[in-house]
């Protein structure tokens, strides 16, 4: 089965004719509406880096632009102490942006994602940053752990190294 059509970027109805070998299929040509997939959607952020991050390493999230020019967006990350954290944004497939930041201390960071002066849906985001070096696993017989075997352990977070 084949389809004879021309790719159009304009939003409107287009005629599509389907056929088996040469005779046309009843009901063809069909009128097919073509719409911009971003219509009805709003720019927003997604990804674990908006909500949880590890200190001392690069963390990231995606900004879904819905076709809006990347120059329209600002990403501001603020540490628990109120300091600005550097953010790098990279153009991705489908015009989305990848935002990267490296938190240096633990606590709740505020991530503002703005389109112009207006926050995108869900912004500001609150990201809990943790220090993995301060998480200790206490378990008797820890040396006998096998991957994929269930174990029980206590997780204790301390402020001491």
Image: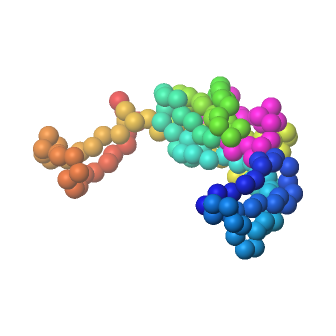
Q: Which residues are magenta?
A: 63-84
Relative image position of residue 74 (x, y in whole percent):
76, 34
* Left or right: 100 in relation to 131: right
Residue 149 appearing in the image: yes
Extreme-front residue of the structure: 22
Residue 112 appearing in the image: no
Between 93 and 63, the one nearer to me in the picture: 93
Q: Is residue 67 magenta?
A: yes
Asked which quadrant contains residue 108, the reply is top right
Between 148 and 117, the one nearer to me in the picture: 148
User: What residue appears at the point 68 percent right and 40 percent down from the top-left corner?
Assistant: 94
Asked which quadrant contains residue 47, the reply is top right
Above or below residue 67? Residue 75 is above
User: What residue appears at the point 78 percent right and 66 percent down from the top-left corner?
Assistant: 29
Above or below residue 15? Residue 102 is above
Asked which quadrant contains residue 133, the reply is top left
Q: Is residue 106 magenta?
A: no
Above or below residue 160? Residue 145 is below
User: What residue appears at the point 77 percent right and 48 percent down from the top-left corner?
Assistant: 7
Relative image position of residue 79 (x, y in whole percent):
62, 34
Relative image position of residue 92 (x, y in whole percent):
65, 34
User: What residue appears at the point 33 percent right and 46 percent down from the top-left corner?
Assistant: 156
Between 23 and 53, the one nearer to me in the picture: 23
Colour scheme shown: rainbow
In this rendering, the count of numbered labels is 0
Extreme-bottom residue of the structure: 26
* Left or right: 84 in relation to 150: right
Relative image position of residue 39 (x, y in whole percent):
80, 55
Q: Quadrant of the C terminus?
A: top left
Q: Quadrant of the N terminus?
A: bottom right
């Amino acid at each position: 089965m084949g389809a004879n059509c021309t790719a159009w970027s304009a939003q409107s109805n287009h005629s599509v004719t389907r056929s088996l070998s040469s005779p046309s299929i009843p009901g063809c040509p069909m009128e097919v509406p073509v719409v911009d997939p971003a219509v009805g959607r709003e720019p927003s952020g997604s990804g674990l880096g908006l909500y949880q991050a590890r200190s001392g390493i690069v963390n990231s999230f995606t900004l879904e632009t819905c076709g809006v020019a990347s120059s329209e967006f600002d990403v501001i990350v603020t540490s628990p102490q109120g300091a600005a954290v550097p953010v790098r944004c990279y153009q991705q497939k489908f015009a989305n942006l990848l935002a990267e930041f490296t938190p240096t201390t633990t606590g709740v960071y505020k991530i503002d994602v703005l389109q112009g002066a207006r926050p995108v849906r869900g912004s500001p985001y609150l990201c809990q940053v943790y220090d993995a070096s301060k998480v200790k696993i206490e378990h008797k017989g820890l040396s006998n752990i096998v991957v994929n075997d269930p174990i029980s352990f206590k997780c204790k977070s301390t402020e001491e190294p």
